[in-house]
Amino acid sequence: MIGNSENRQSFLLPGGYVDTDCELLREVELAPLSGRDEELLATQESLANAAILTVLLSRCVLRLGPIKPVSEDVARRLLVADRQFLLLKLRQVTFGSRVQATVQCPWEGCRKKVDIDFCLHDIPLRASEEKGPLYTRKLSSEAALSIEHGEQYREVVFRLPNGEDQEAISEIIGVDETEAQALLLARCIRRLGPLHDPGPEVIHRLSPLVRAEIERHMEESAPQVDLTLAAHCLECEREFAVPFDLLGFFLGECKTSRGLLYREVHYLAYHYHWSEKEILALSREKRRKYIAFLAEELRRASHAI
């Protein structure tokens, strides 16, 4: 963290956004969810998670380098890991760092619920050493490409996946993960040997070895937010790793606390005579501060009678 003022905090992205002038932008200013944002997330059913995250980031990222405000188009072009990082920080500044959740033991014959309790500060992060926007790598001799005239090529040029790619594959990833991965590679690969923007047909003809090597190079080049958690089942005494769906958990928190949000709006409107619009513009922290002040004033008034 670089610094913070009331309700706003500044961070450095582990990857970064390359603007139209080829400048790398990493510093972001983030605001916690307002009541209106909480209400939006609690009632959102129509969008895929990647699209929901784009909307959320465009509303809560106040600044990216000199870019202000941050549009949905900009939020959509952020790297996948940068979007995960911002979601992690947004959850921290809105609901706090401690997470308590329940997962299911994956072992057959058990399937018991397992409680997990961790701090978001402890999530492993890795910044990318090379900042792109394009990356050039050499494939192994075993994965060399024979594209035309029997000549072999080993050079591949790619960019890293971003939110726009996530949205593009969101409809098919749950149906055909292999097809979704091929589409992702087709979107990100800029050159294979002499072929520029090779497209899905070429990607489908690549061997599993070639695909695996390109995917490995992309993963090693990208920043990382490791949301794989270690868990221990008390029932069967087994240890297991579980991928944690932070966005799904965040959305669930907003849905669960929707009733409380409306009670807070009613309480503040009743005592301060503020409009719903004014109250929903406040962050959860500010609403609770005013509620605490009111509770103290009411307590004093009751003792004075």
Image (spheres, rainbow, N blue to C red):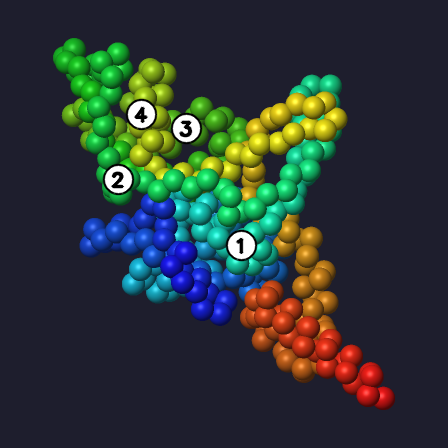
Q: Marks 3 and 1, how far apart in space?
A: 31 Å
Q: Marks 3 and 2, how far apart in space?
A: 23 Å
- Residue 221 position, x and y percent, is 31, 34
- Determine which of the numbered discs, if any, sits on residue 181 in the image: 3
In the structure shown, which secondary structural element does the residue marked by tag 3 occupy? helix
Task: Give the amino acid type for the residue marked by disc 2 in the picture.
Answer: Glu
Q: Marks 4 and 1, how far apart in space?
A: 34 Å
Write down the quadrant of residue 134 in the picture: top left
- Residue under label 4, please give it: 214
Q: Looking at the image, do the residues carrying marks 3 and 1 touch, with CB atoms under 8 Å apart? A: no
In the structure shown, which secondary structural element does the residue marked by tag 1 occupy? helix
- Residue 8 position, x and y percent, is 46, 65
Q: Marks 2 and 4, how far apart in space?
A: 16 Å
- Residue under label 2, please give it: 130
In the structure shown, which secondary structural element does the residue marked by tag 2 occupy? loop
Q: Earlier in the sequence, mark 3 or mark 2?
A: 2
Q: Marks 3 and 4, how far apart in space?
A: 12 Å
Q: Is residue 90 above or below residue 164?
A: below
Q: Earlier in the sequence, mark 4 or mark 1?
A: 1
